[in-house]
Amino acid sequence: MSSQQIESHRENVKVFTEDVVCKLQLLELLQKIYMLKCFLPLDDIVEVGHNETTGFVWLKQKKSKM
């Protein structure tokens, strides 16, 4: 279901997929919404997207190896 929600918000949105860029974009977004960065894990992020029109934000992380 989450993949369907993400797909419905992808149009005309910048999606970031490089490790360092994802972290930087996520930190910038957290600052923009006044959220402390300690609330979200920043490890293993593979995608960050933000639809500014709808306010929808998503993060994708690598699957755990457990």
Image (spheres, helix red, strand yellow):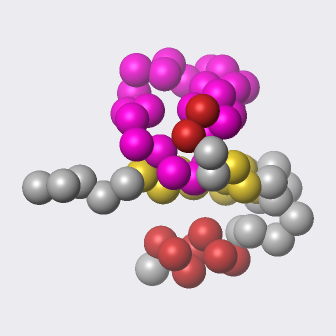
- Quadrant of image for the C terminus: bottom left
Q: Is residue 64 left or right of residue 40?
A: left
Q: Is the residue 9 above or below the residue 59 in the image?
A: below
Residue 36: in magenta span:
yes
Does residue 31 appear in the picture of this structure?
yes
What x and y, as percent, mark residue 39?
A: 39, 27
What x and y, as percent, mark residue 12?
A: 88, 65
Q: Which residue is at the front of the view, 13 or 45?
A: 45
- The residue at 56%/80% (across/down) is 4
What x and y, as percent, mark residue 31?
A: 66, 21
- The residue at 48%/22% (across/down) is 37
Q: Is the residue 12 above or below the residue 60 in the image?
A: below
- The residue at 57%/53% (across/down) is 47
Q: Is residue 17 left or right of residue 63?
A: right
Q: Which residues are magenta?
A: 21-48
Q: Is residue 56 left or right of residue 36?
A: right
What x and y, as percent, mark residue 60?
A: 48, 55
Residue 62: in magenta span:
no
- Quadrant of image for the N terminus: bottom left
- The residue at 72%/55% (across/down) is 15
The residue furthest right is 12
Q: Is residue 11 left or right of residue 39?
A: right
